Image: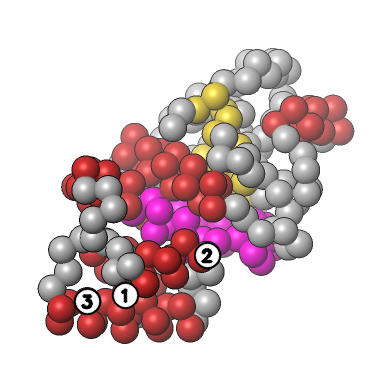
Amino acid sequence: MQIEKPKLAFKGKLTPIKKVTKVVCHHPAHPTWGIMEIHNYHKNSKGWAGIGYNYLICKNGRIQEGRGKNVGAHCSGRNSDTLGVCFQGDFDKQQMTDAQVKAGGWLIAKLIKEHGLQINDVLGHRDLAATACPGKNFRMADLKAEILANLNPKTKTSERKLSGMKPNWKDWQWKEAAEIYKKARVKGILSSDEWEKKATAKNLTFDEIEYLNLVLNGRLL
Ligand SMILES: [Zn+2]
């Protein structure tokens, strides 16, 4: 995956962020707007320097740079120490795509590594401000599982190398893992069909199960 850098003309000079402490997820709450529409709206109607988000994840999984590593305009009071990642769409009405979960997981894992953050530093806008953003259908648990899968290169590489082969679960381990998965599914933590397919094929990774266990025990999210 790669980060595209569309040519965006900003008003004035942007200020680099000194220290990033959180990644904040957003949606533009518009069903179709892409980077140019958001950029023009923020620049011309809001009167900001240009698009307020640091990155945009399109519905088809394309990753585009907005403000990049410069101070954005996406989370009042926290712009100088956070990166805003916006997911295209209106998740009060629409569903987030699997491509967005994949691309967002890749990008945010990269940002976590670059800035020395942890999985708990990934937040929704609503965790920091009185807003519904990023919308009720935002798949935060799926996104965090994808981030963790990207952060563990061992899992990632072996999955890629053994494409089609299952992680090496011992029977008793899988029994416990399947229980955890079922609980997470019932609680609505996992919504996509991709998860169901992986579980049926015993293809969930150790990291994914560990993550679900943490969520179920209230230690994450
Ligand atoms: Zn927001």
Q: Which residue is at the far right? A: 45
Q: Tell me which residue sits at (72%, 59%) in the image.
A: 94
Element under disc 3: helix
Give the spatial CA distance, label 1 vs label 2: 18 Å
Residue 199 part of the magenta segment: no
Tell me the kind of residue under disc 2.
Answer: Ser
In the picture, measured across the screen, residue 193 lies left or right of residue 13, that is: left
User: Taking 65 as reference, is 186 left or right?
Assistant: left
Tell which of 74 and 215 is nearer to you. 215
User: Going by the image, does 7 lie left or right of 160?
Assistant: right
**Residue depth check, mark 1 versus mark 2: number of the one nearer the observer:** 2
Q: Residue at x 39, y 59 (%)?
A: 145
Location of residue 140 with respect to 45 vertically, above or below: below
Graded by Cα atoms within 10 Å as few (under 14), some (14 to 19) or many (20 or more), the crowding at tag 3 reads some
Mark-to-mark CA distance, 3 and 2: 21 Å
Rendered image quadrant of residue 88:
top right
Identity, as a three-letter code, of the amino acid under mark 1:
Asn
Q: Nearer the viewer, residue 90 or 11?
A: 90
Residue 128 appears in the rendering: no
Was residue 144 drawn as part of the magenta stretch in this picture? yes
**Mark closer to the chain start, 1 or 3:** 3
CB of residue at label 3: within 8 Å of ligand 1? no
The span shown in magenta is: 122-148
Q: Which badge, 3 or 2, is on the more N-terminal residue?
A: 3
Q: Secondary structure at mark 2?
A: loop
* Front label number (1 vs 3): 3
Residue 213, which numbered label? 1
Task: Give the percent coordinates (x, y) of residue 44.
Answer: 84, 27
Look at 52% across and 40% down and name the residue there.
83
Where residue 50 appears, as percent x and y from the top left, is 72, 26
